[in-house]
């Protein structure tokens, strides 16, 4: 390994793969259709029409701009014993997916005429497609089976997962061995860096179209260069036994360590320039938090900073303080230390009971936890809906909105949709939406087990009256995302039954 600036590169690589097109096809969907030859009248389509609840298809929604989501596939693999495993359907609705999978298990596998039953392959059947935005049963006439490309040294692996793992190791090793540490230093990288790496494997095993995203444009180009020098694949990707091309997409946790103190100081100085530091508050935390306690702190997933949030009451007293730590005891201690710091030193100039104030406390740098605090707070003001004007804190404002949305859903929900699902017991739905800079509700997306239920919730939320005021960050209007979990308790299916209970909470 090159030893420039004594930098050590460590990688944790997560790979995912998707088939792409060869030169003779316009795109991968045209290629799939060429092999699968889907038909609404073949034997598999007739089977599914008689074995799944086709009423569910009437409410299925497709993403018009996402070609892959205009179809519903069923995929599976074979294990070393020749048994089908990992059977799953790809719709957004668990009730429909379960319906498809359970029906498929009753189908005679011999009728699929699978020419090659190998644990190295992934098998795909189209079950449903979009016809003028309506879901129709349109099954594959021929099964499509894909095999990943194989590097030298991975050809002895005998199943899909092992091939994937070997490919991961080879790519990881190549990046570590060939990445220029000079370019790492120029980009001022240290600690954990998230990278995305994409490239295409051609039908002849060559690599093209490397496209990487990292911290800077120059570093992205360096990653593109390194990926471009990967050796040719010994065995190219295939679809139904015929060489094809294959897209590889990687998410990488890129960890850089250094023994050079001047380099560390340079990187830290660059990061500190993001906001003006409150060194007095930092010293306060350093006095009240031992090095041993600091070293033992773990950060939330996908976060490299611990923060504190709070609001102020009419008298200017701190209330509703909380941190983003998953450790309740640590959170209590951080709040206690912060609360013992003189409030008048926090540089809060915009004192409003509806503001939420945030401060950085601890960050992760060079595999160490260090105290870093911002001088001026980040100020968030939640959106305000009619009926919530008298709220006395951000938490009470959110609670008011929660109750408002709950009342609207309970009032507007069509309980006759009970007859559109065979599900009983607890049904969980998750709705995501945004309140834009004008206070309008946009981007409503609902994840539900049943399309009728999901569409009803989506329609209700879309028609909620816009907020009187949008959300603000540091005095400027911002888009505010919301997630709404909705829980139904549904009794057994009876002609006169309706939803027994509808609970909603943020």
Image (spheres, grey):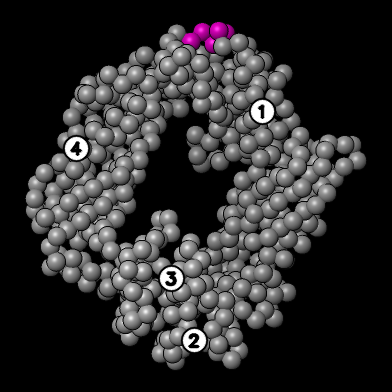
* Circle nearer the viewer, 3 or 1: 3
Does the rendering let one see residue 282? Answer: no
> Which of 149 and 328 lies nearest the eye of the viewer?
328
Asked which secondary structure carries label 4, the reply is helix
Q: Identify the residue at horizontal 55%, vertical 7% (top origin).
A: 110
Q: Is residue 431 above or below residue 123?
A: below
- Which quarter shows the C terminus? bottom right
Identify the residue position indicated by label 2 in the image: 350
Magenta-drawn stretch, dominant element (helix, strand or loop): helix
Label 4, label 1: how many angstroms apart (C-alpha)? 44 Å
Residue 39: horizontal and vertical position, in percent? 58, 17
Label 3, label 2: how many angstroms apart (C-alpha)? 20 Å
Label 4, label 3: how many angstroms apart (C-alpha)? 37 Å
Identify the residue position indicated by label 1 in the image: 99
Q: Image check: 475 left or right of 164?
A: right
Q: Identify the residue at horizontal 83%, vertical 36% (top origin).
A: 493
* Circle nearer the viewer, 1 or 2: 1
Q: Earlier in the sequence, mark 4 or mark 3?
A: 4
Label 4, label 2: how many angstroms apart (C-alpha)? 53 Å
Q: How many marks?
A: 4
Asked which secondary structure carries label 1, the reply is helix
Q: Earlier in the sequence, mark 3 or mark 2?
A: 3
> Any magenta on residue 318?
no
Q: Which mark is residue 307?
A: 3
Mark 3, other Cα within 10 Å: few <14 / some 14–19 / many ≥20: some
Identify the residue position indicated by label 4 in the image: 174
Q: Is residue 413 above or below residue 249?
A: below
Q: Earlier in the sequence, mark 4 or mark 2?
A: 4
Label 3, label 1: how many angstroms apart (C-alpha)? 45 Å
Mark 4, other Cα within 10 Å: few <14 / some 14–19 / many ≥20: some
Q: Identify the residue at horizontal 32%, vertical 78% (top origin).
A: 286
């Amino acid at each position: 390994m090159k030893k420039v600036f004594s930098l050590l590169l460590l990688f944790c690589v997560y790979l995912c793969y998707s088939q792409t097109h060869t030169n003779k096809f316009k795109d991968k969907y045209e290629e799939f259709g060429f092999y699968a030859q889907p038909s609404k009248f073949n034997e598999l389509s007739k089977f599914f029409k008689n074995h799944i609840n086709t009423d569910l298809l009437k409410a299925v929604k497709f993403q018009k701009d996402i070609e892959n989501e205009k179809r519903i596939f069923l995929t599976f693999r074979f294990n070393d014993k020749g048994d089908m495993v990992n059977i799953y359907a790809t719709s957004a609705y668990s009730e429909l997916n379960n319906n498809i999978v359970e029906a498929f298990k009753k189908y005679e596998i011999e009728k699929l005429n699978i020419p090659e039953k190998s644990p190295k392959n992934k098998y795909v059947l189209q079950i449903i497609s979009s016809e003028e935005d309506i879901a129709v049963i349109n099954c594959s006439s021929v099964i499509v089976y894909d095999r990943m490309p194989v590097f030298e040294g991975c050809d002895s692996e005998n199943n899909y997962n092992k091939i994937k793992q070997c490919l991961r190791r080879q790519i990881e090793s190549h990046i570590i061995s060939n990445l220029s540490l000079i370019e790492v230093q120029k980009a001022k990288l240290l600690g954990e860096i998230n990278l995305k790496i994409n490239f295409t494997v051609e039908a002849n095993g060559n690599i093209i179209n490397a496209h990487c995203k990292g911290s800077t444009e120059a570093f992205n180009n360096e990653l593109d260069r390194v990926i471009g020098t990967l050796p040719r694949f010994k065995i190219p990707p295939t679809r139904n036994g015929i060489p094809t091309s294959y897209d590889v997409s990687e998410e990488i946790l890129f960890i850089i360590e250094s023994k050079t103190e001047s380099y560390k100081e340079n990187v830290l100085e660059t990061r500190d320039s993001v906001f003006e530091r409150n060194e007095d508050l930092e010293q306060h935390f350093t006095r009240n938090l031992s090095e041993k306690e600091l070293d033992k702190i773990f950060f939330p997933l996908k976060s490299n900073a611990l923060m504190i949030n709070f609001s102020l009451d009419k008298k200017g007293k701190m209330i509703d303080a909380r941190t983003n730590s998953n450790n309740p005891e640590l959170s209590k201690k951080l709040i206690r230390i912060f609360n013992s710091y003189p409030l008048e030193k926090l540089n809060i100039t915009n004192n409003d009971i509806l503001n939420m104030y945030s401060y950085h406390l601890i960050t992760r740098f060079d595999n160490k936890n260090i105290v870093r605090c911002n001088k001026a707070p980040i100020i968030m003001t939640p959106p305000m809906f009619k009926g919530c004007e008298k709220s006395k804190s951000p938490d009470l404002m959110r609670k008011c909105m929660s109750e408002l949305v709950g009342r609207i859903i309970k009032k507007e929900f069509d309980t006759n949709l009970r007859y559109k699902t065979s599900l009983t017991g607890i049904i969980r739905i998750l709705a995501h939406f945004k309140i834009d800079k004008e206070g309008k509700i946009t981007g409503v997306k609902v994840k539900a087990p049943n399309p009728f239920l999901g569409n009803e919730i989506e329609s209700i939320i879309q028609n909620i009256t816009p907020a009187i005021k949008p959300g603000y960050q540091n005095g400027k209007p911002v888009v505010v995302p919301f997630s709404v979990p909705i829980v139904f308790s549904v009794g057994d299916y009876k002609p006169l039954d309706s939803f027994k209970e509808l609970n909603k909470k943020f």
